[in-house]
Image (tube, helix red, strand yellow):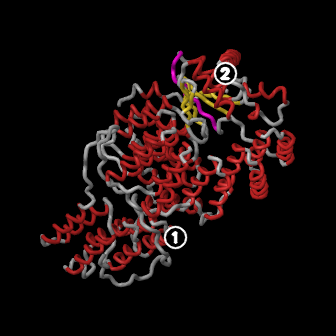
């Protein structure tokens, strides 16, 4: 199949570049109070020591600056204006509720808030508590105020919305208009809409969003870019793409926020090519993208394995973004990794002067996917050496790296030390990774034991992992038990039947494999179609099994037949255990020849110069016969081949694979 994508890179290249507050109880106005969610954790940043792979500038954290400023303020006989400035500064950094409470008490003791008549200072205190995800404390300040303006109401509405308490935010909006006599402005609606978008799982979200949208139109703010961007985000969160387009067309603006929201909306709705096209239109209108737009585009290019497009977007970002952004850099790192370029991912990681735990986590995950567990373990040691604190994601990614490499002893040691040494309680995902590790290595019985002992109920996906291991290791007894259970829990999930059929086929029990296939047909279940794709030049070329739809299909098949002859002469023997169950015995070897990943390689070998690295992607796990064929392809052609399946990356060179035949 020939699949041209949006080819933008030639165009991109030519574009320009704790003391409690002293407050009375609140008076009623909005909905009843509900328990607040925990505040978002803020990752600690620290220096990264130089290593043989890295040379980073040593920097220090400035997390203590609000506290230092507070001490200086208290010591210098502050004015209400000085208190307001400090609260405002603290709100925009990493707000600490305990520090704010103490400053609030100091302001009350000094008489600045005693009569409740200082609107500016009261609003600053209210906004601080709202920023800390403490809307109830903000509400107590609000109820004490003698005068309120739009800024005050907006801050409180935003506080409840950001804390996930949508109904109370809506109740406040009604109070603002009816009791407060204050007209909403362009900051009111974004605060309110953010609360609706956060609760997109609710049944009445679209109705609520439509009602607020109507109020926006009544207020004459439907053309405002700030409000328009919020409407786009709200509708995107509910999946209402047509409404998103209507809002975007109504907002006649060149504001980058609106365009950024539109790109995010397309990504939310799985319209990746439309997002790329919107980015191109944005550049054509000379609108400078913000950092988070580049982050989103890097994620698209990575998920679609569009390496050339990703490189062009990266080059464009270097021309337009001067300040380094951690989220953008991590997205760039992941993009190169997802496109099979682990060396480029390393270079992005090493180019960071300041890295945080999230950066390390991204790189450890990438190394694990590319079969480099030693490097992943070295990065883990660097985290601890630098003074940063590993989190549960760090340990999960390192466990995954050990799992992919079959390092069971190292993985179990890490898992057993999680709570005692790292102070992190294992989650379901950690247990699942360990169970996968045990099962994949052939310890099926031990993996079953771990499932029974873990403090979580196993989900069907975890049982399916063990069933896949039973297929790999030919444990038909355990496999049959798990398959029967999964057939009852998920009667229409094709993977369960395919895995059981694979067990029977590997053991040569073709009659039983045929029964599994017949059961699938009886229940009307179709397996997922396998396909592979390769990016060549400005186009992505996609291939299915025995696919003859490509414009140069005849040349591809001739080249593949030639390649098969060459690798057979070099020692390749087709493994008919991976042939389709329904294929007649004398045709099983022939059916293996035209698997989608073999066709993709044959095309790449034709279309690219000799010696070039080929990067090929597959939507399912690579079969054992194709894995063996790829090793021989790399031997007879002298090419490096990077193959990404739905589990990991395989780097083939000179007749060997980076996975060591363990996947």
Q: Quadrant of the N terminus?
A: top right
Label 1 sits on residue: 167
Instruction: Place residue 112 in its image quadrant.
Output: bottom left
Residue 515 image position (x, y, % from top left):
86, 44
Residue at mark 2 to residue at mark 1: CA–CA distance: 69 Å
Q: Is residue 524 magenta?
A: no
Q: Which mark is nearer the camera, 2 or 1?
A: 2
What element does badge 2 sit on? loop
Q: Is residue 74 left or right of residue 218?
A: left
**Number of numbered tags placed on the structure image:** 2
Residue 618 in the magenta stretch? The answer is: yes
Residue at image location 85% in from the left, 47% down from the top: 519
Q: Residues within 10 Å of mark 2 (few under 14, many from 20)?
A: few
Circle 2 is placed at which residue position?
A: 571
Q: Quadrant of residue 376?
A: top left
Q: Nearer the viewer, residue 613 or 264?
A: 613
Q: Mark 1: few, some, or many residues within 10 Å (few <14, many ≥20)?
A: some
Front one among 106 and 170: 106
Which residue lies at the image location 84% right of the left edge and 26% below the top edge?
586
Residue 35 position (above or below residue 428): below
Q: Which mark is residue 124?
A: none
Percent position of residue 125, x then y: 30, 70
Q: Which residues are magenta?
A: 610-619
Question: Hey, which quadrant is residue 11 in on the image?
Answer: top left
Who's the residue at 40% across and 41% down the image? 254
In the rendered image, is residue 30 in sight? yes
158 or 545: nearer the eye?
545
Q: Quadrant of the C terminus?
A: top right
Residue 584, x across and y down, in percent:
85, 30
């Amino acid at each position: 199949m020939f699949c041209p994508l949006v080819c933008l890179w030639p165009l991109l290249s030519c574009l320009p570049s704790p003391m409690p507050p002293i407050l009375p109880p609140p008076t009623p106005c909005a909905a009843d109070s509900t328990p607040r969610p925990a505040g978002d954790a803020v990752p600690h940043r620290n220096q990264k020591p130089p290593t043989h792979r890295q040379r980073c500038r040593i920097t220090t954290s400035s997390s203590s600056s609000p506290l230092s400023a507070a001490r200086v303020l208290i010591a210098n006989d502050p004015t209400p204006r000085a208190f307001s400035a400090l609260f405002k500064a603290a709100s925009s950094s990493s707000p600490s509720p305990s520090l704010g409470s103490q400053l609030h008490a100091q302001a009350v003791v000094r008489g600045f808030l005693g009569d409740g008549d200082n609107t500016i200072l009261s609003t600053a205190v209210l906004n601080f508590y709202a920023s800390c995800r403490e809307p109830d404390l903000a509400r107590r300040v609000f109820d004490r105020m003698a005068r309120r303006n739009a800024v005050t109401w907006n801050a409180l509405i935003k506080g409840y919305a950001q804390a996930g308490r949508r109904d109370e935010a809506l109740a406040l909006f009604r109070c603002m208009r009816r009791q407060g006599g204050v007209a909403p402005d362009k900051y009111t609606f974004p605060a309110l809409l953010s609360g609706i978008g956060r609760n997109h799982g609710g049944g009445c979200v679209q109705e609520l969003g439509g009602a607020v949208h109507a109020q926006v139109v009544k207020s004459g703010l439907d053309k405002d870019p700030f409000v328009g961007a919020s409407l786009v985000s709200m509708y995107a969160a509910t999946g209402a793409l047509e409404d998103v387009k209507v809002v975007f067309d109504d907002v006649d603006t060149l504001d980058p926020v609106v365009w950024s929201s539109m790109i995010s909306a397309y990504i939310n709705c799985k319209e990746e090519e439309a997002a790329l096209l919107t980015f191109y239109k944005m550049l054509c209108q000379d609108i400078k993208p913000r950092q988070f737009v580049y982050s989103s585009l890097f994620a698209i290019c990575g998920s679609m394995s569009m390496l050339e497009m990703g490189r062009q977007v990266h080059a464009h970002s270097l021309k337009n973004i001067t300040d380094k952004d951690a989220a953008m850099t991590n997205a760039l790192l992941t993009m190169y990794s997802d496109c099979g370029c682990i060396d480029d991912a390393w270079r992005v990681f090493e180019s960071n002067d300041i890295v945080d735990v999230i950066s390390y986590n991204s790189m450890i995950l990438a190394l694990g996917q590319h079969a480099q567990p030693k490097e992943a373990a070295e990065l883990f040691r660097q985290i601890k050496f630098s003074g940063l604190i590993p989190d549960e994601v760090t340990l999960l990614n390192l466990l995954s790296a050990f799992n992919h490499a079959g390092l069971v002893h190292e993985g179990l040691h890490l898992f057993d030390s999680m709570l005692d040494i790292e102070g992190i309680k294992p989650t379901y995902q950690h247990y699942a990774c360990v169970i996968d590790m045990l099962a994949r290595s052939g310890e099926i019985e031990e993996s079953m034991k771990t499932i029974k002992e873990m403090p979580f109920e196993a989900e069907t996906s975890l049982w399916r992992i063990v069933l896949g291991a039973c297929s790999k290791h030919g444990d038909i007894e355990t496999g049959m038990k798990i398959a029967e259970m999964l057939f009852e829990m998920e009667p229409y999930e094709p993977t369960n039947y395919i895995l059981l059929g694979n067990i029977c086929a590997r053991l040569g029990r073709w009659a039983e494999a045929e029964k599994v296939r017949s059961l699938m047909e009886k229940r009307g279940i179709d397996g997922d179609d396998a396909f592979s794709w390769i990016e060549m030049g400005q186009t992505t070329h996609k291939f299915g099994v025995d696919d003859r739809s490509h414009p140069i299909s005849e040349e591809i098949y001739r080249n593949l037949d030639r390649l098969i002859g060459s690798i057979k002469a070099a020692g390749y023997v087709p493994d008919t255990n991976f042939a389709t169950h329904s294929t007649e015995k004398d045709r099983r070897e022939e059916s293996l020849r035209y698997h989608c990943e073999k066709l993709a390689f044959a095309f790449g070998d034709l279309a690219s110069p000799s010696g070039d690295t080929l990067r090929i992607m597959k939507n399912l796990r690579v079969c054992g016969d194709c894995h063996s064929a790829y090793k021989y392809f790399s031997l007879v052609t002298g090419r490096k081949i990077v193959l990404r399946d739905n589990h990991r990356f395989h780097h083939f060179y000179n007749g060997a694979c980076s996975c060591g035949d363990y996947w």
